Image (cartoon, helix red, strand yellow):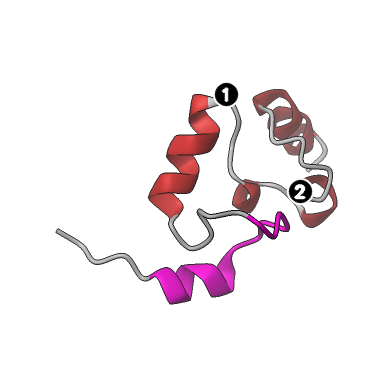
Amino acid sequence: MRECKVEENTAECACTYEPCSRKGLCCECIKYHWSHRELPACVFPPEVERTYDRSIGRFVATQSRR
């Protein structure tokens, strides 16, 4: 089994929600957001991530602008 690199992940985390208990715990983050039919902050551009709209629809919209 692989070891989670929490400190390394936290340094790279794009989430701006400060009280988030899942920062650096990517597996938990993905599981949490997917259970809400969302995607994690790391897949969004910074200007979209700051809106906290992590919906799949918003993700698709950001992809069509590329």
**Residue position for label 2:** 49
Picture coordinates of residue 23, whole percent (x, y): 53, 60
Q: Quadrant of the C terminus?
A: top right
Q: Residue at x 61, y 53 (%)?
A: 42
In the image, the segment drawn in magenta is: 6-19
Label 2: which secondary element: helix
Picture coordinates of residue 22, whole percent (x, y): 50, 54
Q: Residue at x 41, y 69 (%)?
A: 6
Residue 64 magenta-highlighted: no
Q: Amino acid at mark 1?
A: Arg
| Observer-nearest of 47 and 15 | 15
**Residue position for label 1:** 37
Picture coordinates of residue 13, whole percent (x, y): 59, 63
Q: Residue at x 77, y 41 (%)?
A: 52
Estimate how packed mark 1 is, as few (under 14), some (14 to 19) or many (20 or more) residues with alpha carbons within 10 Å.
Answer: few
Report, in whole angstroms, how far the alpha carbon at label 1 lies from the one at label 2. Answer: 16 Å
Q: Quadrant of the N terminus?
A: bottom left
| Observer-nearest of 51 and 43 | 51
| Marks 1 & 2, CB-CB < 8 Å contact | no
Picture coordinates of residue 45, whole percent (x, y): 75, 52
Q: Residue at x 75, y 30 (%)?
A: 58
Furthest-left residue in this view: 1
Estimate how packed mark 2 is, as few (under 14), some (14 to 19) or many (20 or more) residues with alpha carbons within 10 Å.
Answer: many
Q: Amino acid at mark 2?
A: Glu
Q: Mark 1 or 2 closer to N-term?
A: 1
Disc number placed over residue 28 in the picture, else none = none
Report which quarter residue 20 is drawn in: bottom right
**Does residue 41 sit above or below 13 in this rendering?**
above
Label 1: which secondary element: loop
Q: Is residue 6 left or right of residue 51?
A: left
